[in-house]
Image (spheres, rainbow, N blue to C red):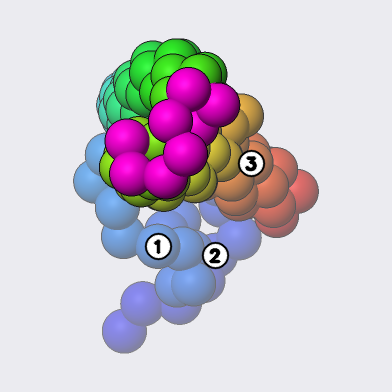
Amino acid sequence: MATHSGWADDARPDAPEDPRSLGRLVSDLSEQATRLVRAEISLAKAEVSAKAKQAGIGIGLVAGAAVLALYALGTLITTAILGLANAVSPWLAALIVSLVLLAITAVLGLLGVKRLQKGMPPVPDQAMENLQEDVDTVKKGMHR
């Protein structure tokens, strides 16, 4: 029958039975922290890349709208000239073409602005939130 003698080498009954040493635990913590930071950096890169892609598409659509707007302006000028030169028919056809070009310009412009808004600002929001949660978790663990 074993009794507790009070000597330092007696095993405490409430002590956790973990065969790993303190050095090994610190090493594991360091490894896991490194992996976590690398994963967060990878997430941040992916998030910034996705937002940059959205911004690029938006810029392309806005540029397309700008080009069509220039053509529409040229067509509107031609329409005014033809309208003054001839009384009815040729300028009416040119006006219809101008209105169609302006409608396409408006659609492209709106789509481009929406894409730009999706990609702005190019900040990795999700990665930053995850990193803050990780820091908070580590701080809570250190205070135990």
Residue 16 is labelled as: 1
- 56 left or right, relative to 136: left
Q: Mark 1 against mark 2, which lies toward the viewer?
A: 1
The disc labelled 1 sits on which kind of residue? Pro
The disc labelled 3 sits on which kind of residue? Gln
Name the main secondary structure of what is drawn in magenta. Answer: helix
Local secondary structure at mark 3: helix
Residue at 64% of width from left, 41% of height from top?
132
- 49 left or right, relative to 81: left
Is residue 76 something one can see in this rendering? no
Is residue 128 something one can see in this rendering? yes
Q: Badges 3 and 2: C-beta atoms under 8 Å apart?
A: no
Choose top left, top right, bottom left or bottom right for residue 16.
bottom left
Specify the segment rendered in magenta: 83-90
Query: In the displayed image of the protein, which residue is found farthest to the right?
Result: 143
Q: Which residue is mark 2?
A: 5
User: Residue 29: x, y in percent?
Assistant: 40, 31
User: Residue 35: x, y in percent?
Assistant: 30, 26
Taking depth in this image into account, of 9 and 39 the one nearest to the observer is 39
Q: Which residue is mark 3?
A: 132
The disc labelled 2 sits on which kind of residue? Ser
Between the residue at mark 3 and the residue at mark 2, the CA separation in whole angstroms equals 48 Å
As drawn, 77 above or below 123: above
Question: Does label 1 or label 3 sit earlier along the sequence?
Answer: 1
Taking depth in this image into account, of 100 and 94 the one nearest to the observer is 94
Q: Mark 3 against mark 2, which lies toward the viewer?
A: 3
Residue at 33% of width from left, 44% of height from top?
89
Residue 116 is labelled as: none
Local secondary structure at mark 1: loop
Q: Mark 1 against mark 3, which lies toward the viewer?
A: 3
